[in-house]
Image (tube, helix red, strand yellow):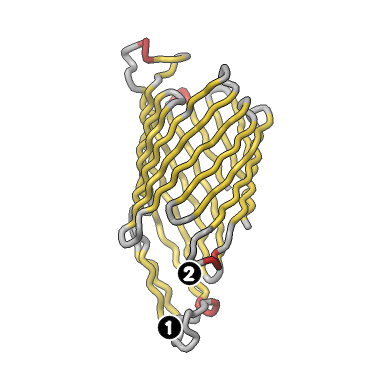
Amino acid sequence: MLADGEIKAKHVGLGGYLIHDQTGPTGKSAVTVSVAYNIQLYEKNAARFTNGRSDHVLSIGVSLSAVQYRLRGDQLELDNPGDPRLYESKGFSIFPDASAGVYYRYKQNFYFGFSVPQMLGLNINYRGNDGFADIKKVQHINVMVGGKAEFNRGNFAIEPVAAFRWVKGAPPQGDIGLRMTGYKVFWLGANYRSLNYMVFEGGFNVKNQFFVSYAYDFNFSKYRQDIGSTHEITLSYTIKKSAKVWRGVGPVLRF
């Protein structure tokens, strides 16, 4: 469950989310709070403003999290059944975490973002009566760039986006995608991920307040076909009140 909003008069964005995930023998639950400060650039030049707001906005954000990681060693499946299990107990560990990022936007036409999640890079230790497991959380580097081009008097728009992720010890991963929006009511899009994944999405909104979206994650790589594909359905809503705009996301159904 996620919620985020903006206090326009203060140029401040606030947000947070709760997550509970269980995938096979591993699981994670977390609570995160985040804050961002929006800097209106070129404030001394009135020509740079549209409707009282700057065309150029720079946002700096940080988030703090408390995360519980879980491991059920008794559910681990070995590639070689003859290998001894070093860890068969149930265990969990709770750790703090932090993330930071910078985001630049020019009107609705161009944006660029850079972020580093899991900044603390902590070791997660699970200890049981029959052994222990040690998992290292490492920093990621995420870069994103995209834009928006409107046509037919603003009734339609195309939104290209590209992203790059880097993690030490893992192959770099890149995404490139395109979304088309019609009458600011419905959208369709597709995204290609460099590790042989395709993501297809679509959705619509009601009076720009209630949103429904669906995404399908298709794996067509020649390895790890057992991972399969993912379906995701998201419901979200927006609450507008004076100088504050709040958006909530939930529930999210993934299977």
* Callout 2 amino acid: Phe
Position of residue 121 measured from the top left corner of the image (x, y, whole percent): 33, 59
Residue at 37%, 10% in the rendered image = 47
The x and y percentages for residue 113 are 38, 38
Judge whether 238 appears above or below 50 on screen: below
Q: How many marks?
A: 2
Q: Gap in Å between the C-alphas at discs 1 and 2?
A: 16 Å
Q: Is residue 146 above or below residue 19?
A: above
Residue at 60 percent across and 35 percent down: it is: 187
* Horizontal arrangement in the rendering, residue 81 relative to residue 208 (left or right): left
The residue positioned farthest toward the front in the image shown:
222
User: Where residue 134 is drawn, which disc sits there?
Assistant: none
Q: Nearer the viewer, residue 80 or 107?
A: 80
Label 2 neighbourhood size at 10 Å, few (<14), some (14-19), many (20+)?
Answer: some
Query: x%, y% of residue 137?
Result: 37, 61
Image location (x, y in percent) of residue 35: 42, 39
At label 1, the amino acid type is Leu
In-front residue for pair 117/68: 117
Residue reaching furthest to the right = 206
Q: Of circles 1 and 2, which is in front?
A: 1
Q: Nearer the viewer, residue 17 or 210?
A: 210
- Disc on the earlier residue, 1 or 2: 1
Q: Quadrant of the C terminus?
A: bottom right
Quadrant in which residue 118 is drawn: bottom left
Query: What mark, if any, has residue 86 been given in the picture?
Result: 1
Residue on which disc 2 sits: 92
Few, some or many residues within 10 Å of mark 1 (<14, 14–19, 20+):
few
Tell me the element at label 1. loop
Locate residue 102 relative to residue 191 in the image: left or right.
Answer: left
SS state under label 2: strand
